[in-house]
Image: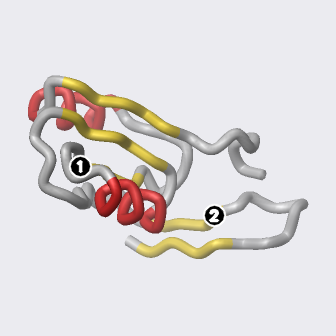
Amino acid sequence: YWQARLFDKNRPKYLSKGKKPINIYGYGSQRAVLVEDIASAIRLARVSPEMCASPLLGSTISFEVLRYFKKRYPRVTIWLDRDKANK
């Protein structure tokens, strides 16, 4: 899997190829927060040790990934940026 960030407003924000991995940052066991990018996941895990964070690597989530987190964590929160997807 690879991902690149574009800064051209006329193109999608991220380009990627391959199956997205599931990376979990932090050691919290009661709550998982799913965010758009790796930097946000690391930041959140550092300031909120009671929860873990995982980057979606974009603004979409598959049912497979959602089931994975719902099975392992009592609380799952999806926290996305306010910008439009693919912009």
Does 87 appear above or below 7?
above
Give the quadrant of residue 80. top right
53 in relation to 16, above or below: above
Viewer-proximal residue, 86 or 38? 38
Q: Residues within 10 Å of mark 2 (few under 14, many from 20)?
A: some
Q: Is residue 6 above or below residue 72?
A: below
* Residue under the image location 19 percent in, 27 percent down: 70
Q: For the residue labelled by badge 2, is the local secondary structure a helix, a strand or a loop?
A: strand
Count of numbered circles in the view:
2
- 1 versus 13 height, above or below: below
Closer to the chain start, of discs 2 and 1, is 2
Picture quarter with the N terminus: bottom left
Alpha carbon separation for disc pair 2 and 1: 24 Å
Work out whether residue 53 or residue 13 is closer to the camera in this orientation and state it.
53
Instruction: Look at label 1 and name its amino acid.
Output: Cys
Instruction: Please tell me whether mark 2 or mark 1 is closer to you in this view.
Output: 1
Residue displayed at 46% across by 67% down: 39
Q: Name the residue located 70 percent from the left edge and 61 percent from the top edge.
A: 13
Residue 10 x, y percent position in the rendering: 89, 60
Task: Looking at this view, name the residue that lies furthest to the right.
Answer: 10
Residue 14 at what x, y percent from top left? 63, 63
Q: Is residue 12 left or right of residue 79?
A: right
Q: What residue sits right under mark 1 in the picture?
A: 52
Q: Are the residues flagged by discs 2 and 1 in contact, CB closer than 8 Å?
A: no
Left of 81 or right of it: where is 67? left
Give the residue at mark 2: 14
Tell which of 75 and 59 is nearer to you: 75
Q: Nearer the viewer, residue 51 or 4?
A: 51
- Residue 24 pos. (x, y %): 23, 57
